[in-house]
Amino acid sequence: PLFCSDCSGTRPQSHRTHRGHRGERDNRGRRLPDSTASMRRRFEPLTESKDRTTTTSDTVRRQSSAGAEPLPRYLSLLLLALSSLLLIFVLAAYPDATASGGALPESNNGLLRNQISTKERQPRRIVGVGDTHGDREALVRALRLANIVDESGMEWIGGPTSVVQIGDLLNKSEQRDEDTLTYIAHIEKKARDAGGSVIVTVGDHDLHNVPKLWKSILPDKPFPLWMRALHIEDRTLFVHGSLSRSVFHEIGGNVTRLDEEVATWLAGTGIKPPWIGRGDGPVWSRLYSDNGSDEHPDCEELSRLLDELNVDRMVVGHTVKRNGITSICDGKAWRIDVGLSRTESRAGKIGASEVLEIVDGSRVEVLNTETKLKSWLPTNRYGGQQQS
C-alpha cells in the first residue's frame, strides 16, 4: 500500500491522490496543478512534521546561499598561494638579507629599495698608474697587475674602479704613441660601460702630442674629457708634476677652472693657459716629485694646501723613482713614476711594474709584480718608506 506524507501513515491512498493530480492544495486551499505539486515535492526536504510551512522559493534561496558559502574559502586559498609566490620571489632576489638575518629593504614609493642597503657595500677603489711614455705593453701590464683588465688587456674587469694615469701617457709622437692613445680610448669606453672611469692628468710630453695624434687617428670624435690638468677623487689630488700652494693661488686657486682652461685649449677651442708652461706650475714642477723625505722643507705648505682643498694626499709623477713608489711628508705626497716604459728605466726593460691603490679614500697600498728591481724597497700601508 502507498501512504501519504501528509496523513497519519495508516490509511491507504489512491495512486492519483498520492501523485497530487487531485488532492494537493496550496496554503489558501486552492488545488495545485500537477507540475507545481511535482516541483514542490522535488525541492522540499522530507520531514515528519505536519505543521511545516516553508515554501518552495524559501528552500531554493536557502540552498543557493548554502552553495555560495565555500567561495570565500577559495579566495583565501588563492590569496595564500599568491602570497607564497611573492615571498619566494623576494627571498630569491635578496638572499644575503635573509641568510644574515637582516631585514628586507624598506618600501620606497611602492618599490623595493636598492640592494645596496642589504648587500655588502663594495669598497671604493682608485688605482694610480705612473708615466708610460707611449709604452702600451707597460700600460696593459700595470692594469693587469691591479686586476683592471683581463689577460688580453682588451676587456675591463675592474667594475666601478677608477684609474688615474698620472701623465706622460705618450712620448714623442712615435708610432707606439698612436697605439697607446688608441688603446686608452678603447679601455676608457669599456670602463664607462662597466661603471668605472679612466682619467689622465696631462703631462709635459702630452701637451702637444695628444691633440695632434687625436685629430689624426680619431678625427670624428671630440677631444676626450678624461684628459685633465688636475683631478681630485676620494680625498686625493692627482697632478703630473707638483703643485705648491703659492702657485696654485697665483694661477687662480680653482681646480675646476684650471681643468676647463686646459680642456678647451687641448680641444682647440680656447687659448693656451699662461701658466701651462711655467716651470713651477702643476705640469712641470718637481717640487714634491724630486728627491725628498719627511723633512722636506715644503711639507708644511703642502699640508696647508691639502687642507684648503679638503684632501689628504697628493699623487705625482714626472720624476722616475729608482726605489719604486715612495712617499714623503708623512704620507701626504706619493711619487708613482717608477719608469714603466722600456725606454725610461731598467724596470720597464725587465717587465717590472708597480701601481698605487687607494681604497675608500683612506687605505693606501703599493701593488707590484713578482718581477721587480732590487732597489725597490717595500712601503708600509701608511706610506713611510721602510729602510732595510
Image (cartoon, rainbow, N blue to C red):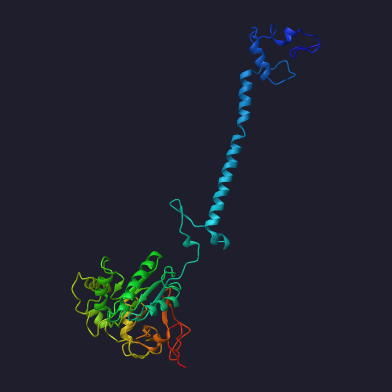
x then y, percent, for residue 103: 53, 59
Locate the N terminus and report the quarter of the image it occupies. top right
Please give left or right for residue 252 compared with residue 139 in the image. left
Please give left or right for residue 150 compared with residue 179 in the image. right
Vertical arrangement, residue 96 with respect to residue 248, above or below: above
Vertical arrangement, residue 225 with respect to residue 173, above or below: above
x then y, percent, for residue 32: 64, 9
Q: Is residue 254 visible?
A: no
The residue at the point 53 percent across, 54 percent down is: 90
Vertical arrangement, residue 162 with respect to residue 381, above or below: above
x then y, percent, for residue 99: 58, 62
Residue 11's image quarter?
A: top right
Vertical arrangement, residue 55 with respect to residue 265, above or below: above
The residue at the point 43 percent across, 51 percent down is: 109
Residue 156's image quarter?
A: bottom left
Residue 280's image quarter?
A: bottom left
Nearest the camera: 212 or 286? Answer: 212
The residue at the point 57 percent across, 39 percent down is: 75
Please give left or right for residue 5 compared with residue 186 in the image. right
Q: Is residue 387 visible?
A: yes
- Of all residues, the one furthest to the bottom in this rendering is 388
Nearest the camera: 172 or 297? Answer: 172
